[in-house]
Image (spheres, rainbow, N blue to C red):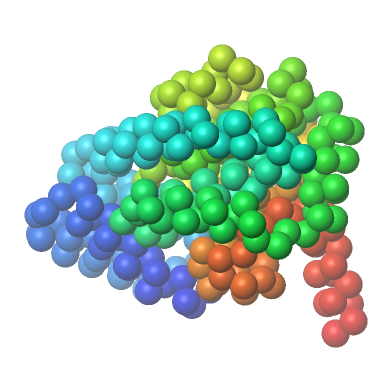
Amino acid sequence: MRIYLDCIPCFVRQALDSARLVTDDERIHEKVVREVLRLASDLDMSQSPPAIGQQIHRLIRELIDNTDPYRELKQRFNRLALRLCVELEERVRTSEDPLETAVRLAIAGNIIDLGVKTSIKESDIERIIRDCLTADFDNQQIEGFRNAVSRAEKILYLADNAGEIVFDRLLIEQLPAEKVTVAVKGAPVINDATIEDAEFAGLTKMVEVIDNGSDVPGTILETCSQTFRARFEDADLIVAKGQGNYETLSGADKNIFFVLKAKCPVIAGDLGCEVGEMILRNSKAFNDIVDLVKDAE
């Protein structure tokens, strides 16, 4: 997905929010905003939004001399998610359709995105969980996902955020563990999950976990390690969590199921859905529809 004009003020807002979150130094706030405005003035609009996000957050980390400024927040949301998931595990276990319930909860966990909103309350997460468990959902997409999982030999699960990764565990538990590899970020960026978060969530004891060698808040293959790229190419099913992975992989020629909550009007417009809608969408099916529409035009 390319950068839209509406993304530009969001870049500035996100950069300032992030800078204020990690330091009270107004001089750094000003430096961050000025640098982001400079980047925006010479922006390659064909890039994906996370490509700019990488530059913004590298700048913030350099200015405050902290390689992981969100670490404390990530740990807090991991602990909160783990506490909430004690009850939710039982909800999945007793469900008439455990896979569907686990997908709904994995999508609910996508609300823990500090790149979109820097202040997330426990009550916000609890409300989103209730909404996701009861909202209408496309049963055809669930069945398509179920069939894809049953046919797959090598499943690559691209995690998104800390805290959210605990909710991901509920879904990963419904997949064939021997076929699953989970990939996290290779270095800290915003509140994206790293190996440390995967260990906290208990995933390293369940499935193989690797890092992608990158600090992009998404998956730009050119920035990832050769090891990760080989795994990506070898996978016959990819489960991609969150907006950043959608933004960077929506045009990829792979069998990808995007799993997210559309939290941004630009993302919702690109997906053709409403803001707040739960998304479980197969890339190949979606891209085929887009091609048909373009041909008709």
Using the image, determine if residue 77 lies above or below residue 277. above
Q: Is residue 30 visible?
A: yes
Which quadrant would residue 92 be assigned to in this image? top right
Q: Residue at x 81, y 55 (%)?
A: 139
Outermost residue toward the bottom in this view:
297
Q: How many marks?
A: 0
Which quadrant would residue 270 be assigned to in this image? bottom right
Using the image, determine if residue 179 lies above or below residue 150. above
Give 247 or 160, whichever is nearer the viewer. 160
Outermost residue toward the top in this view:
205
Estimate the x, y position of residue 143 in percent, counting from the top left.
Answer: 85, 47
Which quadrant would residue 274 be assigned to in this image? bottom right
Estimate the x, y position of residue 95 in percent, counting from the top left.
Answer: 71, 38
Which quadrant, please, contains the N terminus?
A: bottom right
Instruction: Determine whether, in the image, residue 14 is placed left or right of residue 51.
Output: left
Q: Is residue 195 visible?
A: no
Instruction: Determine whether, in the image, residue 39 is placed left or right of residue 65.
Output: right
Q: Residue at x 77, y 40 (%)?
A: 96
Q: Residue at x 55, y 23 (%)?
A: 203
Which quadrant, please, contains the C terminus?
A: bottom right
Instruction: Determine whether, in the image, residue 246 is placed left or right of residue 235.
Output: left
Q: Residue at x 22, y 52 (%)?
A: 21
Estimate the x, y position of residue 262 in percent, counting from the top left.
Answer: 57, 62
Estimate the x, y position of residue 118 in percent, counting from the top left.
Answer: 32, 56
